[in-house]
Image: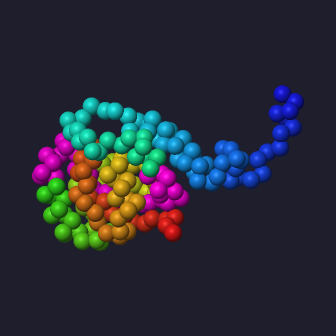
Amino acid sequence: LGSLATTPPISNPKVLFCPHTNIKMNRFLLALLSALLIVSTSAFAPSVSSVRVPTQQYSLLDTVSSMYNNWGKKANASHILFKPSQFDEDAAKAKLTEMKAEIGDDPEKFAAAAKEWSGCPSAKDGGSLGEFGPGMMVKNFDDVCFSEEVGVVQGPISTQFGEHLILINSRTGEE
């Protein structure tokens, strides 16, 4: 115990896991550990749903991959969600496509439409989800938020929660 008490604190914050590995390995390990924590949260826990789309399941590998590929990035997005209890899939996509044409890429119109139509609790905030990092949203949603053009309404996008229109308000950490 005496030797532990005299061990100096880590003076180099880049040496987080192991001083003998390179930065990319440390980044990968941090992404893996973070992904394990994210995947174990209730948003990613298996749930009983009438809508099952196998391609929308977010595996640990997808989470780690997103976190690694988008390291240091943050996105701020808003969405309009049509839950399966509101509309069937085809009707939801048709209505969202119609709304997308009416909204254009206008953030004020998007927020007003979200308040009126969205089935998500974020509707009261104009659909705003705030800022989030890679791997924190379900796969299809995450893919859009970290790869598509900022300021443009995207969708309809299908997830296990329903059909979405997504407006990426901003993204930071891009090279």
**Residue, x 49% and y 38% (percent of image)?**
36
Residue 91 lies in the magenta stretch: yes
Q: Is residue 96 something that shows in the picture?
A: yes
**Residue, x 23% and y 69% (percent of image)?**
103
Residue 143 lies in the magenta stretch: no
State left or right for residue 32 relative to residue 83. Answer: right
Colour mapping used in the image: rainbow
Query: Image quarter for residue 9?
Result: top right
Q: Quick check: 45 above or below 30?
A: above
State left or right for residue 66 relative to residue 106. Answer: right
The percent position of residue 167, horizontal first and vertical second, equals 33, 63
How many labels were placed on the picture? 0
The percent position of residue 147, horizontal first and vertical second, equals 38, 62
The percent position of residue 154, horizontal first and vertical second, equals 28, 63
State left or right for residue 63 relative to residue 72. Answer: left
**Residue, x 83% and y 39% (percent of image)?**
7
Dividing the image into 4 quarters, which one contains the N terminus? Answer: top right
Q: Quick check: 144 above or below 151?
A: above
Q: Is residue 133 something that shows in the picture?
A: no
The percent position of residue 143, horizontal first and vertical second, equals 36, 56
Q: Quick check: 143 above or below 58?
A: below
Observer-nearest residue: 50 or 80?
A: 50
**Residue, x 38% and y 41% (percent of image)?**
59
Observer-nearest residue: 131 or 148?
A: 148
The span shown in magenta is 66-92
